[in-house]
Amino acid sequence: MADLVQWTAAAEARLKEIPFFVRPAARKKIEKYARENGITEISESVYQEAKNQFGRKS
């Protein structure tokens, strides 16, 4: 995919807090969230925003 999203070191560290067996799916969801919102770099705040979005099932 050409629209590659970059991760900051801090956001990568937060991602590593997620259990390894769900980490790839979480990474995909967070990157999809970033692309849909025109975000090219995933920082800790973007990571948290995405995580908050996943918690909301409306």
Image (cartoon, rainbow, N blue to C red):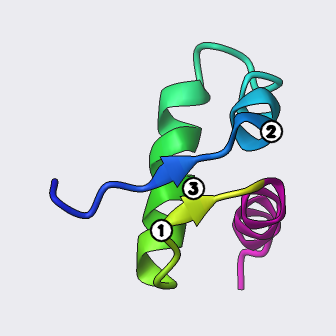
Q: Secondary structure at mark 3?
A: helix
Magenta stretch in the rendered image: 44-58
Q: Is residue 45 magenta?
A: yes
Given the image, on which type of amino acid does mark 1 rest?
Thr
Q: Secondary structure at mark 1?
A: loop
Question: Mark 2 touching mark 3, by CB under 8 A?
Answer: no
Mark 3 crowdedness (10 Å alpha carbons): few <14, some 14-19, many ≥20: many
Query: For the residues marked 2 and 1, what is the alpha-carbon distance in whole angstroms?
Result: 15 Å
Viewer-proximal residue among 55 and 43:
43
- The quadrant in which the C terminus is found is bottom right
Q: Which residue is mark 1?
A: 40
Given the image, on which type of amino acid does mark 2 rest?
Ala
Q: Which residue is mark 2?
A: 10
Given the image, on which type of amino acid does mark 3 rest?
Ile
In the image, residue 53 lies at what x, y percent?
73, 72
Q: Please state if 54 lies on the left or on the right of 34 as rendered.
A: right
Hey, which residue is sitting farthest top in the picture? Answer: 20
Can you tell which mark lies on residue 30?
Answer: 3
For image coordinates 42% across by 56% down, the residue present is 5
For image coordinates 51% across by 84% down, the residue present is 37
**Mark whose residue sits in front, 2 or 3:** 2
Query: For the residues marked 2 and 3, what is the alpha-carbon distance in whole angstroms?
Result: 14 Å
Mark 2 crowdedness (10 Å alpha carbons): few <14, some 14-19, many ≥20: some
Q: Secondary structure at mark 2?
A: helix
Disc on the earlier residue, 2 or 3: 2
**Mark whose residue sits in front, 1 or 3:** 1
Disc on the earlier residue, 2 or 1: 2
Disc on the earlier residue, 1 or 3: 3
For image coordinates 72% across by 75% down, the residue present is 57
Quadrant of residue 22 within the rendered picture: top right
- Name above or below for residue 51 compared with residue 37: above
Predominant SS of the magenta segment: helix
